[in-house]
Image: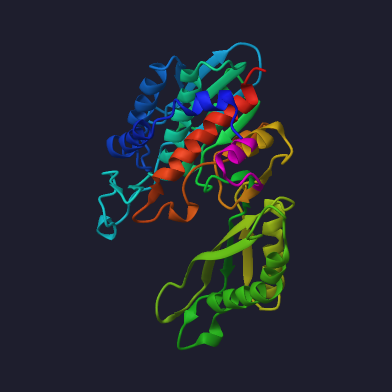
């Protein structure tokens, strides 16, 4: 049950103010990436937080990707940082939208628009949750930081990673705002994108025996992966991640002309990994099968490569941060049990630096990056309350 301090904090949260702030972020600052210019979004957040007594600093190494560090400093004690991003993916074909993607219309309790969920709902909830703590006058120790950035949709090097490497007051705890349906996600799957390229020998299609057919070689590799590797991945399990390891053959190209035996074929495999796996290991599993198959075909060779992968992350489910957020969810009647997150987030940059990190926020991840993206008003308000309560649970005096 909520205590007196919780009630004081929650009393400072106003639904109309919060949702209008979210609408302004969607409507008045499109921040589509590319190019990802988030300057207007950062200005909107900075003005709101400065008006409530937060000390605001803007840092960054790219002009269009400023990073906001807004601090409520209450002296010695732990530091809790909220992180969320304001860059959004393009809306795509606007004819596929039932409502204009940047009008932020509210229809039947839903805010529609590009970025309404991913990730401006988390931004609005974090900003307003932090403001509720400041307005309440409830004593806290340490510092509460609201960190708003861009570049998440292109990897986070100039946003969250820049924050990790350059922020003056290093956080002890981080809540990365993303669409988790207000579940407490203590880690995220990593990635090991893998490119497989088969090289054969070109010939006239009327004389196929003169060539080495790269597409046929690739077909044999894909069949072997389907029979030998994919079932193994589906059997790998982690108690906090469902689904487990996954794979998607997301791109394929090959051949030069209709009447030429193809001398090259390439596929891209989107490989997602869970804690306990490594990106190098995931690429090697594919490489071993591909090289074995190709070794049986005279005149053919294969190259398997993977860029630097994204490591899966996992914070301690028994950490003070997880317990504090679990208590916030219990007070609000939400699910307090930790789980894992299937997608990559900016949270990985903080977790990799050894900072206790969870991913938490309003919205359904399946609605991100699609036409008619929306977030529920109720979800946003629940998250706003949860962000406010977790701050008190970690920083509150007494």
Where does the image place residue 135, in percent across and percent down from the top left? 46, 19
Q: Residue at x 35, y 48 (%)?
A: 109
Q: Nearer the viewer, residue 63 or 394?
A: 394
> Which is more toward the observer, 244 or 159?
244
Q: Is residue 114 left or right of residue 381?
A: left
The answer to if 333 sits in the magenta stretch is: yes
Any part of residue 119 in sight = no
Q: Quadrant of residue 390?
A: top right
Q: How many marks?
A: 0
**Which residue does the image show at 59% across and 40% down from the upper left?**
329
Question: Up-down: is 303 above or below 204?
Answer: above
Magenta extent: 327-338
- Side of 370 relative to 309 (left or right): left
Q: Is residue 4 magenta?
A: no
**Percent x, y of residue 86:** 41, 36
Furthest-top residue in this view: 75
| Figure check: 302 above or below 344 | below
Q: Is residue 286 above or below residue 187?
A: below
Residue 337 appears at what percent x and percent y? 66, 46
Q: How is the image coloured?
A: rainbow
Which residue is depicted at the point 26% across and 53% down?
99
């Amino acid at each position: 049950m909520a205590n007196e301090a919780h009630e004081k904090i929650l009393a400072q949260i106003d639904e109309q103010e919060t949702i209008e702030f979210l609408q302004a972020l969607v409507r008045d600052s499109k921040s589509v990436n590319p190019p990802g210019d988030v300057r207007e979004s950062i200005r909107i957040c900075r003005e709101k937080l400065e008006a409530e007594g937060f000390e605001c600093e803007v840092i960054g190494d790219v002009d269009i990707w400023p990073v906001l560090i807004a601090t409520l400093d209450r002296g010695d004690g732990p530091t809790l940082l909220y992180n969320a991003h304001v860059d959004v993916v393009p809306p795509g074909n606007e004819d596929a939208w039932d409502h204009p993607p940047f009008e932020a219309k509210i229809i039947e309790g839903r805010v529609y628009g590009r970025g309404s969920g991913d990730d401006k709902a988390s931004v609005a909830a974090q900003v307003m949750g932090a403001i509720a703590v400041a307005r309440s006058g409830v004593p806290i120790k340490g510092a509460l930081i609201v960190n708003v950035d861009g570049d998440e949709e292109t990897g986070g090097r100039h946003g969250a990673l820049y924050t990790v490497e350059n922020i003056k007051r290093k956080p002890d705890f981080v809540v990365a705002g993303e669409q988790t349906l207000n579940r407490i996600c203590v880690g995220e799957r990593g990635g090991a994108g893998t490119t497989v390229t088969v090289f054969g020998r070109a010939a006239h299609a009327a004389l196929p025996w003169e060539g080495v057919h790269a597409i046929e070689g690739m077909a044999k590799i894909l069949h072997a992966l389907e029979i030998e590797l994919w079932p193994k991945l589906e059997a790998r399990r982690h108690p906090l991640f469902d689904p487990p390891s996954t794979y998607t053959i997301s791109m394929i190209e090959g051949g030069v002309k209709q009447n030429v035996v193809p001398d090259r074929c390439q596929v891209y495999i989107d490989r997602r990994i869970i804690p306990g796996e490594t990106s190098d290991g995931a690429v090697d599993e594919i490489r071993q099968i591909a090289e074995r198959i190709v070794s049986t075909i005279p005149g053919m060779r294969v190259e398997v490569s993977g860029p630097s992968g994204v490591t899966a992350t996992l914070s301690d489910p028994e950490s003070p941060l997880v317990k504090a957020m679990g208590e916030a969810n219990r007070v609000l009647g939400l699910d307090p049990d930790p789980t894992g997150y299937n997608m990559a987030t900016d949270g990985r940059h903080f977790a990799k630096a050894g900072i206790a990190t969870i991913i938490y926020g309003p919205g359904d991840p399946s609605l991100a990056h699609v036409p008619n993206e929306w977030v529920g008003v109720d979800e946003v308000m629940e998250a706003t309350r949860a962000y406010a309560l977790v701050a008190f649970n970690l920083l509150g005096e007494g």
